[in-house]
Image (tube, helix red, strand yellow):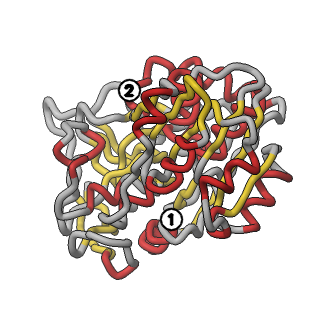
Amino acid sequence: MEVINKFVSLKAHIDGSPQETDFEIVTETLTFSIVAGSKDVLVKNIYVSIDPYQLNRMKSLSSSQTSGSSYAVGVALGQAIDAYGVGKVVASGHPDFEKDDLVIGLISWGEYSIVKEGSILNKLNSLGFPYSYHVGILGFSGLTAYAGFFDICKPKKGEKVLVSAASGSVGNLVGQYAKLLGCYVVGCAGSQKKVDLLKNKLGFDEAFNYKEEVDLKAGLKKYFPDGIDIYFDNVGAEMLEAAVGNMNSFGRVAVCGVISEYTDKGKRAAPDMIDIVYKRITIRGFLAGDYMSLFPEFIAATTDHLQTGKMHALEDISQGLESVPSAFAGIFRGDNVGKKIVQIAEE
């Protein structure tokens, strides 16, 4: 079987902020054959995830690439870029998958993907939700928020929580989980529109535009006069430093992303180590893949919240493969509200 496939590839490694011109659309003839012993699956891609961490894979060199994590393998120039997404099986040599099965897993920024045996690929049970939800709120973004907040931060009702990049794919969910638990929640974002959304739609107690704060550490005192118990960090740099400076004793910090440092080598978090020691603050980085054992628990809790209307799915969906470069570059300009996804084909 042959299909004409278009995919997004990297023209040159990126060592600053990504631009649309860093990518190109490549057309190829994709040949797929079912041969004895092969368990490859040909998938027509429907939805693909657009995630900031991918930038570290696109650099000429990043410490993440040498971490040993399968999520951080460098992207080769001219090749298809793999990403989490939803698709439909076109042909299969794998006994677990048949033609027209809906699947979710590691596909690519392309119209079609050949998924090799051993790669992440599972049948999709939509559970009655839009397929796109499984790329975001019911996918790795949701698991990241759930595991980081509940397992690492170990919150208690009434605790005071700060969330950075709070209108992003992970931050908005952390804030929603925290409110459902009965915490006091403050989110920071990069525009008044996002601030209003956090307060008026998602029910955050307070929210602020970090771009308007001349002194972040002093600014946080306005929202946390009695100190911060939990900080969920998505950005690093100055925000982490300011949050630690306002934390209570035995405060907890979960770090799942440092987007401010991805594009600026000069930005580094420098929290006061005396605060960390004498306040006995715990700071822990993590990856969603560390918590796959929590996936059933996470899905059960989150689907229940969605069905009862207690949680909202924030999605920012662009249309067509050609929109992938601008969708990715836009994340670093702060264009997206919620989970950034590209729909490649009709469902």
Quadrant location of residue 34? top left
Q: Is residue 191 visible?
A: yes
Q: Which mark is residue 202?
A: none
Describe residue 73's horizontal placement relative to residue 282 as left or right. Answer: left
Describe residue 228's horizontal placement relative to residue 44 as left or right. Answer: right
The residue at which mark 2 appears reads as 290
Describe residue 57's horizontal placement relative to residue 251 as left or right. Answer: left
Determine whether 181 is above or below 209 in the image.
above
The residue located at (55%, 50%) in the rendering is 242
The residue at which mark 1 appears reads as 331
Q: Position of residue 213 (x, y in %)?
A: 65, 65
Q: Position of residue 10 (x, y in %)?
A: 26, 69
The residue located at (26%, 69%) in the rendering is 15
Determine whether 212 is above or below 295 in the image.
below
What's under tag 1, amino acid-wise?
A: Ile
What's under tag 2, amino acid-wise?
A: Asp
Q: Nearer the viewer, residue 267 or 288?
A: 267
Query: Tag 1: Cα neighbours inside 10 Å, few (<14), some, or many (≥20)?
Result: some
Quadrant location of residue 246? top right
Instruction: Report the number of discs.
Output: 2
Q: Position of residue 267 (x, y in %)?
A: 37, 61
Q: Is residue 98 visible?
A: no
The residue located at (51%, 34%) in the rendering is 253
Q: Position of residue 159 (x, y in %)?
A: 72, 27
The residue located at (27%, 55%) in the rendering is 57
Alpha-carbon span between mark 1 and mark 2: 25 Å
Does dot 1 land on a helix, a strand or a loop?
helix
Describe residue 57's horizontal placement relative to residue 54 as left or right. Answer: left
Question: The N terminus lies in which quarter of the figure?
Answer: bottom left
Looking at the image, is mark 1 or mark 2 earlier in the sequence?
2
Q: Are marks 1 and 2 in contact (CB under 8 Å)?
A: no
